[in-house]
Image (tube, rainbow, N blue to C red):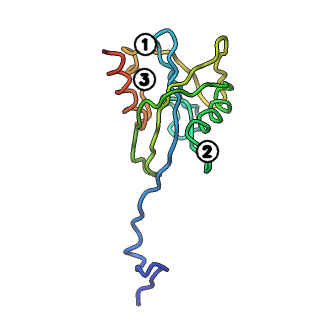
Amino acid sequence: MQGRNSEGCSGHEGAKRTPKSIHVVGAIFVRDGKILAAQRGPGSSMAGYWEFPGGKIEPGETPEEALVRELREELKLDVEVGEFVARGTYDYSFGTVLLDGYMCEIPAGATPKLTEHAQIRWLAPEHLQSVQWAPADVPIVEVLLRTFEG
């Protein structure tokens, strides 16, 4: 006799789960017409890929609050979060990442300090595709390319 879980499904029927959604935020910094890209550090998931710095939204946080917290942790920066730019979505093996990109301002005279990233680069729009972006970041890169074209 086949066993059933609490939802009344047999083990075979319940084996396929809906992937979890992970809502994250990323900062888009523009300085002198260039956009900041951060390379994920060794030992991190997706090490070597480039991204807009940021991270996961914790329960009870707004996207803006999460971005301020994450940038304090990752880059030792206190930033001002501006307007929403775009969302990138990608189905990874561990779940679906929903990445919301926001314009952010680095205070005058402040310099990012790397705590989790291997390096950062300020890329002119025409060089944005010279690095390998994390898949969830690619749709935001595409929006930025269209924005800076026109």
Q: Looking at the image, which residue is at 40% across and 30% down?
A: 140
Percent x, y of residue 112: 64, 20
Gap between marks 1 and 2 measured at Cα = 32 Å
* Image quarter in which the N terminus is found: bottom left
Q: What residue does disc 3 label?
A: 131
For this orientation, the residue located farthest to the top is: 32
Indicate which label's residue lies in the foreground, 3 or 2: 2
Percent x, y of residue 98: 45, 43
Mark 2 is surrounded, within 10 Å at the Cα level, by few (under 14), some (14 to 19) or many (20 or more) other residues, namely few
Label placed on residue 102: none
**Vertically, is 139 above or below 129?**
below
Percent x, y of residue 141: 39, 27
64 displayed left or right of 138: right
Mark 1 is surrounded, within 10 Å at the Cα level, by few (under 14), some (14 to 19) or many (20 or more) other residues, namely some
For this orientation, the residue located farthest to the bottom is: 1
- Residue type beneath disc 2: Glu
Indicate which label's residue lies in the foreground, 1 or 2: 2
- Residue type beneath disc 1: Ala
Q: Looking at the image, which residue is at 42% across and 64% down?
A: 17
Q: Earlier in the sequence, mark 3 or mark 2?
A: 2
Q: Quadrant of residue 2?
A: bottom left
Q: Quadrant of residue 114?
A: top right
Mark 3 is surrounded, within 10 Å at the Cα level, by few (under 14), some (14 to 19) or many (20 or more) other residues, namely some
Label 1: element kind: loop
Q: What residue does disc 2 label?
A: 61
Percent x, y of residue 95: 45, 51
Label placed on residue 124: 1
- Residue type beneath disc 3: Val
Q: Earlier in the sequence, mark 3 or mark 1?
A: 1
* Image quarter in which the C terminus is found: top left
